[in-house]
Image: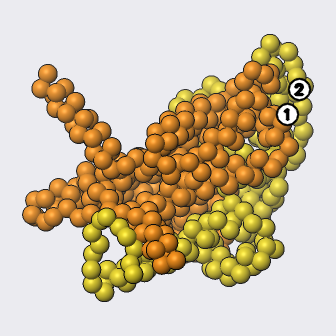
Chain colours: A orange, B yellow
Amino acid sequence: MNALLSRTLGALTAFFAAPVSGTSAALYRVALGGCCFWYAFTLALNVERYFSETGAFPWAFAPRDARWGAFALAPQDEAWALTIFVVVMGLSVVLALGVLPRLVCAVLYYLSLSIHYRNPTISSAADQLLHVLLFLSIFLPLGYRLSVDAVVRRRLGRATPTGSIWSQRLVQMQVAVVYGMTAVTKAGEEVWQSGDALRGFLAMPSYSTWPMWHDPWPFMKPLTWGTLAFELAFAALIWFRPLRPWLLGAGVAFHTGIGTLMQIPLLSGMMIMTYLLFIPDDVAERAVARAGAWLRRRRRG
Amino acid sequence: MGPQTDFPQRRGWLAWVGRVASCVFVTAFVGLMLVQPLSSSHSVRREVRSVERTLRPLRLFSPWRMFVGRARPGYVNVEGELADGQRVWIANFRHEGKSFLARARDARLRKMHAKLKRTRAWRSSYMGYLCREGRARFPDMWRLRLVLRKPRIRDVDGQVVTKARRRTLFTHDCDAPKTQERKRKRGKGRTR
């Protein structure tokens, strides 16, 4: 009994507390910075429409929680709203470069929540996912490698720290839960069981890039069932390292397909971004070394 | 008896406190993540209701229901009516004929328009904004219509499967700013 308990504890500790170098977290950090920049940029184009007193959603309609947000400091000032978006864009660049990335994630999380509460009518599942990812990123070893922080640390002669994988596991579990929950809910619905769901969504002008009724065979029904199978498989099997490259490859194809066929690119981009945290550090380090060597060859040649 | 691992662990009471705090955080986060699809009357959900209520403003947990349900082909857009009776698109979230920047700018209209069907609170504000924006392009525009459109959908062979239909949900007179101003000042129906 004691041996079993010890083995279980050992497995849990290895799963949640194994050391990480932070290379895959660094790649994720760069992608997250890009994603936050795009998020703020597309909103900055809409300051008057969504965030001003003369726009669609004046401050008086904002929910109670908006009073804790950054907009509350000057709720009726359009210039202040624009400043918030410029700050988010700036912080996104700082995050991608790796300057105090955990602190930057905390500030970005607060600002993204402020934006949501200022005008919740435009929020989508992609925004919710961004909130969760920014919050969990506060705990990730984002600045250990490939960052300005790492360069400063090296110059000061300090040792590179190693982190623990638990925060990375939390993001991985969150991604698996996103797939698993949608798949289980969809699997209980008649339209998904009959294989007609994708056919309907691809005919919807509010989502589809080219709204059109496609024949159920040979593609629509297999694609509908394939979507369910992929989502369930990802949630259950991504934890087995030999299967991981196949599932991640299938996921990239899946989200590229969604991003192309449907007008919801942000969610697809973010889901692909989270895949970087599933790449083991040794593989990420080899990829970074190879990319570095290729860049050096190009510069010389 | 300690866990069997093949990697070194930091020693000391601070490291121990850190490990315990991480364990509590991970367990709580994963637990709250997993209870989201349960119905609100489920006993587990009732147990954690107060925690969920406290954490709700942080938007960290969701039942994740993307693409759940049957697809509905209708969508809501806003049309402007010109003095000569001609109708023009004023706010349209579809990508056709738009530049890359315009697409990025209008990407979130879909969400807003979907909510316009149900809410009255901020509809007048939005219409007022669209009147100003629309009149910059069409100075003789005098009325806006919130239109539910079910477009003609063809199959891959070009055969019409669904006929086009349109229904006006709401009209807004662009020359009645005083009414809008009154409603905005009242700030009725705060969104939750």
In the rendered image, is residue A48 in sight?
no
Do tag 1 and tag 2 residues touch (Cβ < 8 Å)?
yes
Measured Cα–Cα span from mark 1 to mark 2: 8 Å
- Residue A277 position, x and y percent, is 42, 51
Q: Name the residue under label 1.
A: B150
Q: Name the residue under label 2.
A: B162
Who's the residue at 16% across and 60% down the image?
A152
Who's the residue at 72% across and 45% down the image?
B67
Report the residue that reaches farthest toward the bottom: B13
Please tell me which residue lies in front, B12 or B35.
Answer: B12
Residue B173, label in figure = none
Q: How crowded is mark 2: few (under 14 residues within 10 Å), some or many (20 or more)?
A: some
Secondary structure under tag 2 reads: strand
- Residue B39 position, x and y percent, is 79, 67
Please tell me which residue lies in front, A11 or B106.
Answer: A11
The kind of residue on which mark 1 rests is: Lys
* Direction from residue A285 to residue B35 in the image, left or right: right
* Direction from residue A46 to residue A168 in the image, left or right: left
* Direction from residue A171 to residue A104 in the image, left or right: left
- Residue A16 position, x and y percent, is 43, 65
Secondary structure under tag 1 reads: strand
- Residue A83 position, x and y percent, is 43, 59
Who's the residue at 56% across and 75% down the image?
B28
Q: Residues within 10 Å of mark 1 (few under 14, many from 20)?
A: some
In the rendered image, is residue A239 in sight?
yes
Task: Assign the C terminus of chain A to one quadrant of the image.
Answer: top left
Who's the residue at 55% across and 32% down the image?
A253
The kind of residue on which mark 2 rests is: Thr
Between discs 1 and 2, the one toward the N terminus: 1
Pointer 1 and pointer 2 on the same chain: yes
The disc numbered 1 marks a residue on which chain?
Answer: B
